[in-house]
Amino acid sequence: MTRLPRKIIIDTDPGQDDAVAILLALASPEDIEVLGLTAVAGNVPLALTERNTRIICELAGKPEALVFAGCDAPLKRRLVTAEHVHGQTGLDGPQLADPVMPLQAQHGVDFIIDTLRQQPEKTVTLCPLGPLTNIAAAFLKAPDIVDRVQEIVLMGGAYFEVGNITPAAEFNIYVDPEAAEIVFRSGVPIVVMPLDVTHKALTTRPRIEAFRAMGTEPGRMVAEWTDFFERFDMQKYGSEGAPLHDPCVIAWLIRPELFSGRHINVEIEVQSDLTRGMTVADWWGVTDRPANALFIGDLDAAGFFELLTERIARL
């Protein structure tokens, strides 16, 4: 029996690892149908994330992809960005030409709402790779769409690895914790790719050189992007390479057997200044709070990079 491709909306704030995730999705049409990409402010401001999203689609040879600009600030807070990791453009490393393909006129939040209303119920998966502002804004504006979502597969949060932007919080959740709280309390089935798993998806020199050896523009760009942001993580964590966070979301949709985790309760801290944005994950089942997320804890790193290399080589 042939499996139909999963219909997804990628919600993104590129970021070099977002770029690799988008390339993986666009290179896998037998597994994934990308209905559209919505940009959100996160790693860098919205004007750059929407531009970067279009650059990546063009790099993948998909200028017909639909790219929308969404929210330019968190629901209730001032925007915090991460140029210190991703560079001033968000895609620092190799020089990139300005995109030629158009930005769609519609607001990204309205695209999410309209798509979920138009597609058959529970056939669209939302794939947020950045702060959850656009998703929460759509749920607030159109509560009728919440029950129509098939699943949310997101990169964000941490438990054992705790924080990467504060001692307690992972960046995507920290930037807009109120949005995260809305999403985690929505009742939609959620799969979480926290730092606990993404920090096991480490680039190594041979893995980066495998991208460069493709002799293609996407392969070269992936190698140069990972070269760029790898140095930040290696210096910070003393690790062998840098974690490819966001591609875990797309890899899960294609090969879920590469991952393992637990179905647990995850709450978002929004009150405390000390731990704002913390994902309080009941990994050990010590509360009676109902499970609301599949929290991924481990992956087959070799299999993950084999999938990435195989698919990006197609572009």
Image (spheres, rainbow, N blue to C red):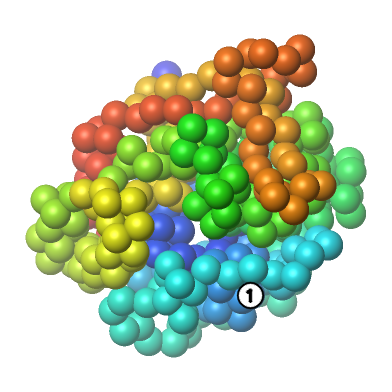
Q: Is 243 displayed left or right of 40 in the figure?
A: left
Residue drawn 33% across and 51% down? 237
- Between 48 and 111, the one lying in front of the other is 48
Percent across and percent down for residue 277 are 68, 48
Residue 74 can be seen in this image: yes
Percent across and percent down for residue 63 are 46, 72
Residue 118 can be seen in this image: no
- Mark 1 sits on what residue? 46
Q: Is 310 displayed left or right of 269 in the figure?
A: left
State the quadrant of the C terminus: bottom left
- Between 181 and 145, the one lying in front of the other is 181
- Between 65 and 216, the one lying in front of the other is 216
- Residue at the extreme front: 274
Q: Is residue 6 above or below residue 8?
A: above
User: How many discs mark residues in the rendered view?
Assistant: 1
Q: Is 275 displayed left or right of 2 in the figure?
A: right
Structural crowding at the residue carrying mark 1, measured as other residues with C-alpha within 10 Å and reported as few (<14), some (14–19) or many (≥20): many
State the quadrant of the N terminus: top left
Percent across and percent down for residue 68 are 65, 69
Q: Is residue 230 above or below residue 224?
A: above
User: Which image quarter: residue 302?
Assistant: top left
Q: The residue tagged with tag 1: helix, strand or loop? A: helix
Q: Is 210 displayed left or right of 281 in the figure?
A: left
User: Which image quarter: residue 187?
Assistant: top right
Residue type marked 1: Leu
Residue drawn 57% across and 54% down? 166
Q: Is residue 22 above or below residue 52?
A: above
Residue drawn 81% across and 47% down? 271
Residue drawn 76% across and 12% down? 288
